[in-house]
Amino acid sequence: MNQSIAYNPNDIRAIAQRGDIYRLLKQYEEALADFSRAVGQNPIYVWAIARRGEVYRMMKRYPEALVDFDRAIELKPDYAWAIAHRGVTYRFMGHRYYEKALAEFSRSIELKPDYAWAIAYRARINDMLRRYEDALVDFDRAIALDRTLFNDWRCERGMLLSYCGRYAEAIDCCQEALLENPADSFALYNIAVFKTRWQGLVEAHPDINTARSALLGLVNSEARGIVLYRLGGLAAIEGKTEQALNYLQEAILLEDEAIEFARHDIAWLELREHPHFLTVVADTNCGRD
């Protein structure tokens, strides 16, 4: 791309494509420069405008992202990709915007019924809105199209089943994950939580200890944030409130989605009205009204 642009500095397609490579490399300032250069030469270059919006979103510059997505969709009203990614922008702007996000995903799916990525995100937003049956329908539809959309799809599906009170099925999903990887700490954590809710703390005690042991072995790994979150969840189901909230508070500093996890994970049921818990999971996202 550099050679092509050096040969023809006005090749806006090459400039925009290089911007997209920078986006994928997470070199966001370079990506912005290239997309802005391309759009500066062609103000109705819809693809570049939408991709610049995605860069702004990834940089958490949400108002600027929405300006670009709005412009791209104004120019091309049936642009399913831009509509879905505007939905993701709303999703990360906080719970006040979840209904807007849901509407965007639904619109993009109407335009492109096999848009697995958008279906998967709609499942996620339905989950956040606690519409768990709807989330499960979308989740199953998404994985039927593309199982790679979720890193741990069996455990993710197990969590949705648990939210619906279908504990036996939820545990079965996680047991399937353990057949592939007996050390899967996500599956072990889920089983401990699901069994506690289904059969009680005494029955689940061995599973809690197994899950805790697996998680403690990962505390200093790259997954530290989610590991601390799950250690907090285990403490919560055991009634160790102070320890659970301390873990959660530290996890939130490392894992962006720990707040959303805690709001839905049934490990935290007893703490959902606890003043300290409510302070810890307070939504600090901001965006345009």
Image (cartoon, rainbow, N blue to C red):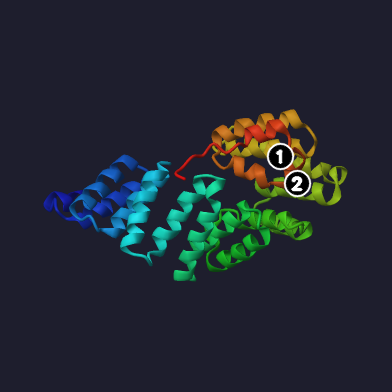
Decide if residue 80 is on the left or right side of residue 211. left
Crowd around label 2: few <14 · some 14–19 · many ≥20 (10 Å)? many
Residue at the image position 73 percent from the left and 28 percent from the top? 242
Q: Secondary structure at mark 1?
A: helix
Decide if residue 206 is on the left or right side of residue 185. right
Count of labels shown?
A: 2
Q: Along the line of sight, which residue is nearer the eye, 247 or 280? A: 280
Amino acid carrying mark 2 in the image: Val
Regarding residue 112, the answer to whether it shows in the image is: no
Residue 163 at x, y percent in the picture:
71, 54
Q: Earlier in the sequence, mark 1 or mark 2?
A: 2
Decide if residue 39 is on the left or right side of residue 135. left
Q: Along the line of sight, which residue is nearer the eye, 275 or 261? A: 275
Crowd around label 1: few <14 · some 14–19 · many ≥20 (10 Å)? many
Residue 6 at x, y percent in the picture:
14, 49
Residues at marks 1 and 2 touching, judged by CB atoms closer than 8 Å: yes
Q: Along the line of sight, which residue is nearer the eye, 34 or 22? A: 34
The residue pinned by badge 2 equals 193
Residue 75, quarter of picture: bottom left
Regarding residue 257, the answer to whether it shows in the image is: yes
Residue at the image position 55 percent from the left and 59 percent from the top? 122
In the depicted structure, whether residue 19 falls above or below residue 119: above
Residue 136 at x, y percent in the picture:
65, 62
In the depicted structure, whether residue 111 falls above or below residue 170: below
Residue 43 at x, y percent in the picture:
23, 55
The residue pinned by badge 1 equals 233
Amino acid carrying mark 1 in the image: Gly
State how far apart marks 1 and 2 are (Cα): 8 Å
Circle number at residue 184: none
